[in-house]
Image (cartoon, rainbow, N blue to C red):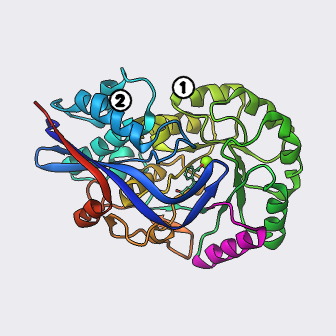
């Protein structure tokens, strides 16, 4: 199939509740939605870069520039057979994994539609067991005004059926929060995510959490660091998980070789897409390192693709993939994803491609910029 046209939409949506992390407050969420057209089919991708470069150096604005000037021209007019070809088409562009992942997702979607199978089935083709039908998920809770507010939010989500709780921390809002949450919910799997807010010299804070039975501590140190994490890890008993530091299969290899982590959070966008994410999964699986699928407050388009990734056999820990209603009142894709309350899982779509339908009216209504690019 020849890639004929790509449409870009810059979307801004209101979140159901503000999301506060060590790197900032978010009331609205921006992203880019990409539609790739070939042979009468449309593949969809989501670029999860937001308005502020707090998690990554990329923003929706830089991603628009990199996509429109470099990545889209590198893809338009080309003969697409399998999605595994596409990372090579984009390789001459350094960095910008979140921009690349939008194209990568769209080519996985369109080729699985062409093959008449779900994104998950196509991605899981190398594994004899195939994709899981439903995946375990948890909820990621932002920093609240007071610890008592956090306790209420946890309770509320446990009532909705979520079984694994992730709490965002930052210096000064960490040990007491973790202790109080552990005391209030003694049997709940609880983990913490620092989003790179600490330095190695802060190891005492994490050592003081050794007796809290935390599921893991995610990304305490620098967003590009691997070495200091390898020095922190032997000083603490909680399992250490890397998010921000893993930008590619090579970074995952370095982190495991250095002993920098026990667990990896795989966000497909952070590693340029699903082909690379699957390779990170394969590496970790070979070395018995558990992985889980992270989230970036995705719309239904991104969420469907997260579920496809999390359906692979090495994803043994609950992902940051919550029900649509936890993020958006009215999403741009249908149907909404819902939690199976009995076992804290979400079903993996099994119809061809992503298995969601984009609501064009809502997409247009939520877009602040839109442009189409055609092959010459
Ligand atoms: O660090 O995992 C993170 C959201 C935006 C940016 C970074 C992170 C997150 C989350 C939310 O934790 C996960 C989700 O529910 O999508
Ligand atoms: Mg994280």
Going 68% across and 42% down the picture, which residue do you hit?
Answer: 219
Q: In the displayed orientation, state which residue is furthest to the bottom.
A: 159
- Residue 321 percent location from the top left of the image: 51, 59
Does the image show residue 294? Answer: yes
Distance from label 2 to label 1 (Cα)?
15 Å
**SS for dot 2:** helix
- Residue 367 percent location from the top left of the image: 31, 56
Q: Left or right of 120: which side holds 187? A: right
Q: Left or right of 13: which side holds 244? A: right
**Label 1, residues with CA under 10 Å away: few <14, some 14-19, many ≥20:** some
Instruction: Identify residue for label 2.
Output: 87
Q: In the displayed orientation, state which residue is furthest to the top.
A: 92
Q: Is residue 26 above or below residue 201?
A: below
Judge whether residue 350 is colored magenta: no
Does the image show residue 131? Answer: no
Residues rendered magenta in the picture: 141-160
- Residue 285 percent location from the top left of the image: 57, 39
* Quadrant of the rendered image containing residue 243: top right
Nearer to the camera, 278 or 160: 160
* Quadrant of the rendered image containing residue 331: bottom left
Nearer to the camera, 77 or 328: 328
Q: Is residue 207 above or below residue 93?
A: below
- Quarter of the picture containing the C terminus is top left
**Label 2, residues with CA under 10 Å away: few <14, some 14-19, many ≥20:** some
- Residue 75 percent location from the top left of the image: 24, 31
Going 64% across and 53% down the picture, which residue do you hit?
Answer: 21
Instruction: Identify residue for label 1.
Output: 250
Going 63% across and 79% down the picture, which residue do you hit?
Answer: 159
**SS for dot 1:** helix
* Quadrant of the rendered image containing residue 342: bottom right
Task: State whether the magenta stretch is mostly helix, strand or loop.
Answer: helix
The disc, 2 or 1, on the residue closer to the chain's N-terminal end is: 2
């Amino acid at each position: 199939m020849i890639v004929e046209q790509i449409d870009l939409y810059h979307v801004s949506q209101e979140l159901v509740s503000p999301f506060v992390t060590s790197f900032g407050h978010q009331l609205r969420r921006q992203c880019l939605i990409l539609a790739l057209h070939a042979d009468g089919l449309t593949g969809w991708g989501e670029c999860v870069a937001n308005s502020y470069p707090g998690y990554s150096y990329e923003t929706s604005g830089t991603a628009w520039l990199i996509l429109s000037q470099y990545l889209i021209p590198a893809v338009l007019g080309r003969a697409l057979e399998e999605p595994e070809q596409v990372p090579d088409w984009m390789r001459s562009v350094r960095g910008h994994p979140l921009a690349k992942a939008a194209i990568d997702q769209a080519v996985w979607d369109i080729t699985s539609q062409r093959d008449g199978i779900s994104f998950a089935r196509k991605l899981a083709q190398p594994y004899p067991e195939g994709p899981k039908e439903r995946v375990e998920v948890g909820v990621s809770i932002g920093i609240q005004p007071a610890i008592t507010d956090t306790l209420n939010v946890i309770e509320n989500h446990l009532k909705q059926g979520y079984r694994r709780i992730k709490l965002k921390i930052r210096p000064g809002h960490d040990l007491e929060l973790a202790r109080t949450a552990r005391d209030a919910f003694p049997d709940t799997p609880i983990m913490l995510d620092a989003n790179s807010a600490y330095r190695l010299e802060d190891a005492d804070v994490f050592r003081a959490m050794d007796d809290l039975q935390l599921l893991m501590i995610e990304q305490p140190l620098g967003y590009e660091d691997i070495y200091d994490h390898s020095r922190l890890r032997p000083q603490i008993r909680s399992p250490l998980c890397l998010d921000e530091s893993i930008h590619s299969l090579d970074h995952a290899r370095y982190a495991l070789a250095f002993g920098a982590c026990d667990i990896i959070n795989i966000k497909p966008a952070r590693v340029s897409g699903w082909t690379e994410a699957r390779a990170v999964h394969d590496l970790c699986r070979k070395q018995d390192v558990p992985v889980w699928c992270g989230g970036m407050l995705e719309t239904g388009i991104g969420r469907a693709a997260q579920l496809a990734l999390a359906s692979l056999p090495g994803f043994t820990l609950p992902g940051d993939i919550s029900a649509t209603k936890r993020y958006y009142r009215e999403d741009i894709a249908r149907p909404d994803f819902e939690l199976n309350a009995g076992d804290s899982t979400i079903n993996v779509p099994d119809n061809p491609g992503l298995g969601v339908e984009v609501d064009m009216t809502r997409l247009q209504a939520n877009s602040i910029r839109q442009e189409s690019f055609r092959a010459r």
